[in-house]
C-alpha cells in the first residue's frame, strides 16, 4: 500500500534545516510551514535523529535524499533503502523525495548527483528502482530534476519527458527544482520556459528554490548549483511562471554553502510566500512566513 | 553502443582516476570541452569529500596544515572512495592510510591522532543502549563468573599509543594556543577510552591494566581471560574494584555465559 504524504498544504513555504540553525529552530520554532532535511545526515544512531524527533513536534518534515542512486545500473543499495524506511517509520514525514541521478558504481559512492543518459534503458531501470523504493518505504516518492553540467551524446529523450514518463509509469510525483531547471537549461543551451511547459503539472508535488553561482570556464559562463546565495532574479521570474501554470505547490528555500543567518532564509521564504499566496486555494492556511 | 553500466564505470574512472578512460567521448561538447564539463563534477566530488574528512579530522588537519591535508585527502579519496551515501561513515580507514602514506613519515603519531578523532566521531553516531545494573551479576553462580561475556556500550573505543596523543589532541583544540598548552613528545604513550554519554563524547586516560581488561571484554573474551590480560599488564589489578567501576560507569549493556563454559559444565 503506497500512501501519499500530504500534510503540507500547497500554499506553504518551507526552509531547509541546516546544522547552524538547529538550536535556534528548536528554541524558537520559526514562522515557516515546514522543514526539509538531508536524510543521509540522520541515518545513524545517537543525537542526530533525536533532533528530528523534537523538530517534528513543531513542524511537518520533509525527508530529502541524495543517496538512493536511483539511476545506478548495478541496482539499489538495499541496506540504504532499509535504513531510509526505518527513518520514514520513525519520523512520519509529510514528504519524501529523491533525485533523478546516480552516484554509485562499482561499490563506490561518488557524492554527486550524476547525470543519466536519457534512454529507454535508463527509463526502465529508474522506473524499476522508483517502484522498489516506493514499495519499501510504503510512500509515494517525489523525484527531483537534477542540475546538469553535461549531457551525453546518446540521450534521445528530453529530460522533462523522461520525468513525465517516470511519473506516469510508477505513480511517483515530481519535485520541480526551478533553480535546477534554470541552471541545466543555461548550461546545456535549452529553454527553461519550454522545459517547464513540458513537465506534467499534476505530478508536481513540491518546488525547490535556491541560489546558484556564475563561473567562467574556458571563456564560457557555467552556472553552478551551489545553494550558496539568494535565489537569482531570473529564477524568481521562472518560479512565478511555474506557479501561474501549475498552481501553488509546497515550496522550499534551500541553502547549503556559506549558510547565512536564519533571518535571511526567512526573508526568502516570505518572498516565495507572496508569490504563492494569491493563488493558494480557498480555505488553505495562509503562509505564516508571508 | 555503450551500456549504462559501462558508461557509469567510465564516468567513475574519469572522476576518480588519474586519466580519462573514455567518458569524455560519451559527452556532448555543446560549446565547452567534455573534459571541462567532467572537471566540474570532479571538482565537486573532491572538494565535498575533503570537507567531510576535514570535519572529522580537524586536529590532523591542523597538525599537517590545510594544504597538505587536502593533498592527503585527494590521494585517499582516489584509493578509498566512500562505499555508501551516509558520509558520517566515511573516513574509518583514513588513520591506516596516514600510517602508510610516505609523506607523513616524519609525523609517526599522526595515525594515532587520527584514530582518536575517528573514535570520537564514531561514538557520536553509535546506537543508544541501556546500561545493565550491577544486579545483573547477582544471578550468576560464582563458578560461572569466569565464563561471563559482557557486551560493552557500542560507543566505546579503547585506544593505546606510544605517543601522548591525548595531550596532542588537547593542545590543538580551539583556544589551546592562547592558554599556552604545550606537548612534550617524549612524555611517552597513553591508553584512552572514548565514549558517548547522552549527547556528549568524551575521551579520558585510563590505566594500562584497565585498558587491557576492557579491550579483552570488548573483543568478546570471557571475564577470566580478560582478568588474565589485565594481571599481565599489572599484577596488582583489582578485579572486584574494576568490575564495580565498569558497572558504575554503565559500560556493560549485555551479559551472556561463555559457550565453552556451558559445554564444560
Image: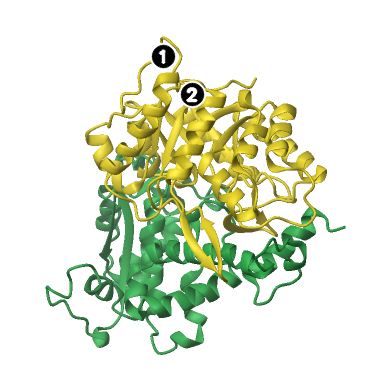
Residue B233's disc number: none
Q: Is residue A144 above or below residue B23?
A: above
Residue B212 in view (yes/no): no
Query: Residue A192 location in percent, x, y?
Result: 60, 42
Residue to which mark 1 is pinned: A284
Name the mark nearer the viewer: 2 or 1: 2
Instruction: Locate the N terminus of chain B and report the quarter of the image it occupies.
Output: bottom right
In the displayed structure image, the side of residue B12 where residue B185 appears, left or right: left
Residue under the point 41% across and 45% down: A231
Asked which quadrant contains residue B157, the reply is bottom left
Residue to which mark 2 is pinned: A248
Residue under the point 60% across and 38% down: A193
Residue at far left of view: B179
Query: Residue A111 location in percent, x, y?
Result: 56, 57
Q: Which chain is yellow?
A: A
**Earlier residue among tags 2 and 1:** 2
Answer few, some or many: residues within 10 Å of disc 1's Cα (few below 14, many 20 plus, some between 14 and 19).
Answer: few
Q: Find numbered disc 2 in the image and state the secondary structure of the residue it sits on.
A: loop
Q: Which chain is green?
A: B
Residue at far top of view: A283
For the residues labelled 2 and 1, say whether their Cβ atoms are less than 8 Å apart: yes
Query: Residue B182 location in percent, x, y?
Result: 18, 80
Residue under the point 25% across and 48% down: B248
Query: Residue A194 location in percent, x, y?
Result: 65, 38
Q: How is the image coloured?
A: by chain
| Chain label for disc 1 | A
Q: Find numbered disc 1 in the image and state the secondary structure of the residue it sits on.
A: loop
Amino acid at each position: 500500500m503506497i500512501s501519499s504524504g500530504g500534510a503540507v498544504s500547497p500554499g506553504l513555504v518551507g526552509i531547509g534545516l541546516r546544522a547552524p540553525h538547529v538550536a535556534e529552530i528548536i528554541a524558537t520554532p520559526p514562522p515557516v510551514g515546514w522543514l526539509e532535511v538531508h536524510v543521509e545526515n540522520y541515518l545513524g544512531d545517537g543525537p542526530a535523529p533525536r533532533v528530528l524527533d523534537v523538530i517534528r513536534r513543531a513542524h511537518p518534515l520533509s525527508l530529502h535524499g541524495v543517496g538512493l542512486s536511483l539511476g545506478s545500473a548495478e541496482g539499489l543499495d538495499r541496506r540504504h533503502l532499509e535504513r531510509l524506511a526505518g527513518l520514514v517509520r520513525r519520523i512520519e514525514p509529510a514528504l519524501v523525495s529523491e533525485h533523478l541521478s546516480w552516484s554509485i558504481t562499482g561499490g563506490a559512492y561518488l557524492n554527486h548527483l550524476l547525470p543519466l543518459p536519457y534512454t529507454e534503458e535508463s527509463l526502465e531501470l529508474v522506473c524499476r528502482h522508483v517502484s522498489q523504493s516506493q514499495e519499501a518505504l510504503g510512500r509515494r516518492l517525489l523525484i527531483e530534476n537534477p542540475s546538469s553540467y553535461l549531457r551525453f551524446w546518446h540521450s534521445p529523450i528530453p529530460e522533462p519527458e523522461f520525468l513525465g514518463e517516470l511519473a506516469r509509469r510508477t505513480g511517483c510525483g515530481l519535485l520541480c527544482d526551478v533553480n535546477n531547471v534554470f541552471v541545466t537549461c543555461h548550461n546545456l543551451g535549452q529553454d527553461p520556459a519550454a522545459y517547464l511547459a513540458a513537465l506534467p503539472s499534476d505530478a508536481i508535488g513540491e518546488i525547490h528554490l535556491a541560489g546558484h553561482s556564475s563561473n567562467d570556464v574556458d571563456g564560457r559562463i557555467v552556472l553552478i548549483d551551489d545553494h550558496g546565495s539568494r535565489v537569482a532574479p531570473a529564477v524568481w521570474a521562472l518560479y512565478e511562471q511555474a506557479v501561474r501554470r501549475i498552481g501553488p505547490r509546497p515550496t522550499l528555500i534551500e541553502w547549503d554553502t556559506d549558510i547565512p543567518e536564519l533571518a535571511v532564509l526567512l526573508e526568502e521564504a516570505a518572498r516565495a510566500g507572496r508569490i504563492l499566496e494569491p493563488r493558494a486555494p480557498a480555505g488553505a492556511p495562509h503562509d505564516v512566513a508571508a | 553502443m555503450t551500456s549504462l553500466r559501462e558508461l557509469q564505470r567510465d564516468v567513475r574512472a574519469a572522476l576518480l582516476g588519474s586519466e580519462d578512460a573514455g567518458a569524455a567521448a560519451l559527452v556532448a561538447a555543446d560549446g565547452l570541452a567534455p573534459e571541462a564539463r567532467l572537471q566540474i563534477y570532479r571538482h565537486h566530488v573532491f572538494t565535498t569529500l575533503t570537507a567531510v574528512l576535514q570535519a572529522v579530522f580537524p586536529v590532523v588537519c591542523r597538525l599537517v596544515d590545510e594544504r597538505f591535508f587536502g593533498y592527503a585527502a585527494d590521494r585517499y579519496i582516489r584509493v578509498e572512495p566512500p562505499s555508501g551515501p551516509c558520509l558520517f561513515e566515511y573516513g574509518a580507514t583514513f588513520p591506516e592510510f596516514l600510517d602508510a602514506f610516505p609523506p607523513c613519515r616524519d609525523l609517526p603519531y599522526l595515525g594515532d591522532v587520527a584514530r582518536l578523532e575517528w573514535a570520537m566521531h564514531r561514538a557520536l553516531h553509535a546506537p543508544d543502549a541501556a546500561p545493565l545494573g550491577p544486579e545483573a551479576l547477582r544471578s550468576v553462580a560464582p563458578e560461572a563468573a569466569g565464563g561471563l561475556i559482557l557486551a560493552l556500550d557500542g560507543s566505546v573505543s579503547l585506544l593505546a599509543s606510544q605517543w601522548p596523543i591525548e595531550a596532542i589532541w588537547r593542545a590543538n583544540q580551539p583556544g589551546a594556543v592562547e592558554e599556552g598548552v604545550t606537548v612534550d613528545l617524549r612524555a611517552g604513550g597513553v591508553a584512552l577510552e572514548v565514549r558517548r554519554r547522552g549527547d556528549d563524547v568524551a575521551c579520558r586516560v585510563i590505566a594500562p591494566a584497565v585498558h587491557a581488561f576492557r579491550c579483552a571484554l570488548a573483543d568478546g573474551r570471557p571475564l577470566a581471560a580478560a582478568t588474565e590480560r589485565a594481571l599481565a599488564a599489572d599484577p596488582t589489578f583489582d578485579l572486584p574494584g574494576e568490575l564495580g567501576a565498569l558497572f558504575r560507569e554503565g559500560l556493560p549493556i549485555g551479559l551472556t555465559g561463555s559457550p565453552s563454559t556451558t559445554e564444560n559444565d
